[in-house]
Amino acid sequence: MSRALRCLLLGVALAGGGVIAGAAAESDPLPLDEPIVADLDGDGRTEVVRALETACYTEEGSRKPPCERGDLRSFYVELVDTCATGALALTLSREMEFASLAEVVDADNDGNARELAFELRAGATGRGVQAKIVRFKVDAGGCISVQKTLFSYPRPETIGKRPKGTAFATGYLNIHDYDKGIKGLELRTIETYSRPADPGCCPSFRRATFWRYVSATSSYKRYRTKLVRLPRPRPAV
């Protein structure tokens, strides 16, 4: 893994509260370095979730895929199903640059781990973000299809109210059993907000929001949120 990529991932892990803690180590694989193989629609056959590479970036410049281990790259998240009508490919994301989370989870608490959760990053500092939790079904032709996106971030309904005079800087998604009194897994989003004069390293506010799954609406509802003002960096002497 290149030094630039390891530094970038370490920064994202620290900012995100451990989203990919440890992923910056030389020997650790990153999410979607290898495809995910799972039966996501419950039809008894496995599907493949993979990074569909669009470009590779090295210290010498850019080149066409396939990328080598350690290359920076751009890609889409693609879901491939070999079904009754042949091979079907679904594009699930925007074009991004690396995955900080990609796993199959039991997001809807039905006892079956079949939902796909992913968080993707982009940009020189990894601040660009797209995160989703998607549930699938079998369509009329016997192929996999998206039943519902249970959670999508950042969207107006999933980011908090901006503190006055700030702009949304970035956000991060974690999935964990945070509250033992709530059935199943919960989500935590962490987002930061910056004022125009803030240096790139140091936003003014940080918000943590917790979400629980509500089966009646097949969606997540926030149940706790906390906004804190961050200390300002001391000027260099």
Image (cartoon, rainbow, N blue to C red):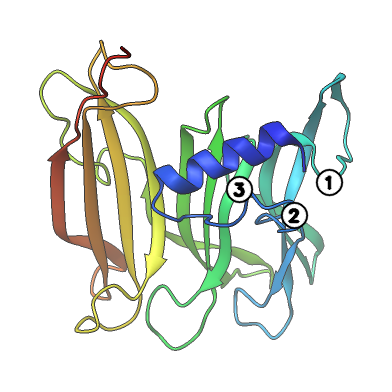
Crowding around mark 3 (Cα neighbors within 10 Å: few <14, some 14 to 19, many 20+) is many
Which comes sooner in the sequence, label 2 or label 3? 2
The residue drawn where x is 80% and y is 65% is: 85
Work out whether residue 237 can be spotted: yes
Under mark 2, the amino acid is Asp
Q: Position of residue 63 (x, y in %)?
A: 88, 25
CA gap, disc 2 and disc 1 = 8 Å
- 42 or 220, nearer to the observer: 220
- 233 or 66, nearer to the observer: 233
- 68 or 102, nearer to the observer: 68
Which comes sooner in the sequence, label 2 or label 1? 2
Q: Position of residue 230 (x, y in %)?
A: 20, 34
Q: Does 185 sit above or below residue 88? A: below
Residue 41 tag number: none
Which comes sooner in the sequence, label 3 or label 1? 1
Q: Does 186 sit above or below residue 58? A: below
Disc 2 + disc 1, Cβ < 8 Å: yes
Residue highlighted by disc 3: 99
- Foreground: disc 3 or disc 1: 1
Which SS class for mark 2? loop
Q: Residue furthest front?
A: 237
Disc 2 + disc 3, Cβ < 8 Å: no
Q: How many marks?
A: 3
Residue highlighted by disc 2: 33
Residue highlighted by disc 1: 69
CA gap, disc 2 and disc 3 = 9 Å
